[in-house]
Amino acid sequence: MATDESFSGKLRVPEALTFDDVLLRPKESRVEPDEAETVTNVSKNVSLNIPILSAAMDTVTEAELAIEMSRQGGLGVLHRNMNVDQLVEEIEQVKRADELIIPLETVVTVDPDLTVREADELMEREGVGGAPVINTRGEVLGIISSTDIRPHLEVAEDDPVREAMTDQVITAPEDVSPRKAFELMYEHKIERVPVVDDENLLVGLVTMGGILQRREYDDAIRDEEGRLRCGVAVGPFETDRALAADDADADVIFIDCAHAHNLNVIDSAREIKAAVDADVVVGNVGTREAAEAIVDFADGIKVGIGPGSICTTRVVSGSGMPQITAVAEVADVAAPEGVPVIADGGIRYSGDAIKAIAAGADAVMLGSYFAGTDEAPGRVITMNGKRYKQYRGMGSVGAMKSGGGERYLKDDPDDEEYVPEGVEAATPYKGSLASELHQLVGGMQSGMGYVGAGTIPEFKQRSEFVRVSSAGQAESHAHDVVITDEAPNYSPDS
C-alpha cells in the first residue's frame, strides 16, 4: 500500500497564470498606437497583417467569415464538421472571392446564334450585366451587354446575338495586372474585359467591380496568385481530408485536436506534414514537453487546453493549463526554432489578446469573439428582447453528433452516450466582423503603445508582466458606477 510520503511530491504544486492574473508594465514610449505594425507569422511560410485567426468551429468559421477575415488581414480556419466535398467547395469559395481573373468555368458566355431574348434571359438568370460571345472553339467573337439590347435600339428580340453584340472587343492577356486591366477599362469606358490566350481563346474575365473590390482591401492577405488565403482544420488521422484540402490550395492545414501531446496524434501529424505542400500547424498543446515533441516538424503550434468560454475540459477531465503560462512554456521551445505560436481560446478583451502576444504568441485565435458577427454561420435568436447568435463548443453534444467528437478522440459512431467537454450557448449579436476586428486590433495597438513597441517582435522583447491581486483585477474593470452606455470594446458581462 502506498504511504502518504509517496504522494508528497504532488503537493509541491507549481503556479500557473492566466490573463486576469497579469498586466503589462507600462514603459517609456514614442510609439503612437495607430503607428504600431501588427504584421506577424501564423506559420513558417504564411504571414498575416493582423495577428488574428478565427476558430475552426461550426458556429464561427465557414467561407463567408473566412473571406472577410482574409480581406481584413487575418486568417479564417474552416471547421471540419462537413464532408470532404463540402470542405473543398468552401475552400474554393474563399479562393474565388477576390480573384482578379474570373476562371473560364465560372464565366457566363453566350453563343452567337442565340436570340437576343435568350441572351437577355440568360444574363438576368445568372445575375450578370454582360457576357463574352464565343464560338464552339472558344474564340472570342464579341461581347454582349444590357446596353446592346435596350428596347430603344434597333434590335429585335428574335435577332441573333451576332447582330447585337459589340464585335470590336477589348481583350487582355493572361498575365494582365490589376493596374493594366483597370487602365484598359477606364480608357475604353467598359466594365469587363475578356482574358484570352495567344490564340484568342477565352480563358477568363476581369470586371471593374472585381478590381475595385480588391483595391478596397489593401490589407488583405493573398497567396502568390493573388487569391485570398485560407486555413483548414482536419482531424489528426484524416489524411484524406488533408490531401483534399491541399489539392484545393488551402494555405495552412491545422491538425485539430484537443490533446496533441498524444503519441498517436503526433505520428499521424508527421505523416500528414510529409504528404502535403501546405504549412501544417499542430495543436492543441499546453506544456513545454508537448512543444518539444512536435517542434521539429510543425510549421506552427497552437496552444490552449481548456481556456475557451464554452469549453469544459478542465472541469470534466480535471486537466488543463492556464493560458498565459501555457503560451509562455510553448514559446520558450518554439521561438528559438522559428516556429510561430498561436494562442487559442480564453480571450475576452483586446487586452487579453495583446497579453497573449507578450507571453510569446505570434497570433491569437478567437471563437466567441466572432461568433456573434454577421458573417458567422450561427443563427440569430432573440432572448429577453436582445439578439444573440448560436455558439457551441466543438466538444458539445451537438457538435459531437455532427462529427466534432474526433477532436476529443471520442468518435465512436456506435456510441450514443457522449462525454462532452463543451456546451451549447448563445453570444450577443455584434454586427460586422470588420467592426469587431477594428476594435480588437486597435486595442492591441494601444497595448503596444504603452510598452513602446512599434512591431510585434519588438513588443515581445520589451514587454514585462506584473502580477495582479484580486483587488487589482476588480480595479481594472469599470467600478463604483452604473454603466449607462456600453463601449463597443468593453462589456462587464464578458
Image (cartoon, rainbow, N blue to C red):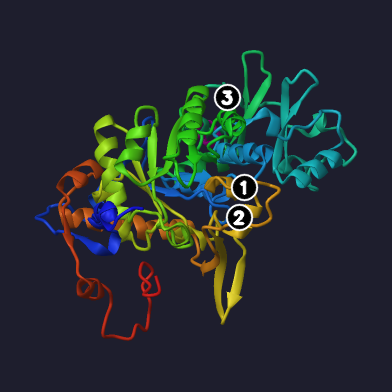
* Residue range of the region highlighted in magenta in the rendering: 182-186
Tell me: 278 left or right of 91. left
Q: Residue at x 34, y 32 (%)?
A: 295
Which residue is labeled 1 in the image? 81
Distance between the alpha carbons at the discs numbered 1 and 2: 8 Å
Question: In the rendering, which numbered label is found on residue 172?
Answer: 3
Spot occupied by residue 244 in the image (x, y as percentages of width and height): 61, 30
In the rendered structure, the answer to whether residue 431 lies left or right of residue 298 reads: right
Mark 2 Cα shell of 10 Å, populated few (<14), some (14-19), many (≥20) = many
- Kindly identify the amino acid type of the residue bearing the numbered disc 3: Ala
| Residue 385: image location, x then y, percent | 56, 81
Residue at (58%, 28%) from the top-left corner? 243
Whether label 1 touches label 2, CB < 8 Å = yes
Q: Residue furthest left?
A: 28
Query: In this orientation, which residue lies closer to the viewer: 436 or 294?
Result: 294
Mark 2: which secondary structure? helix
Q: Is residue 355 visible?
A: no
Give the camera-side residue of 340 and 413: 413
The label shown at residue 399 is 2
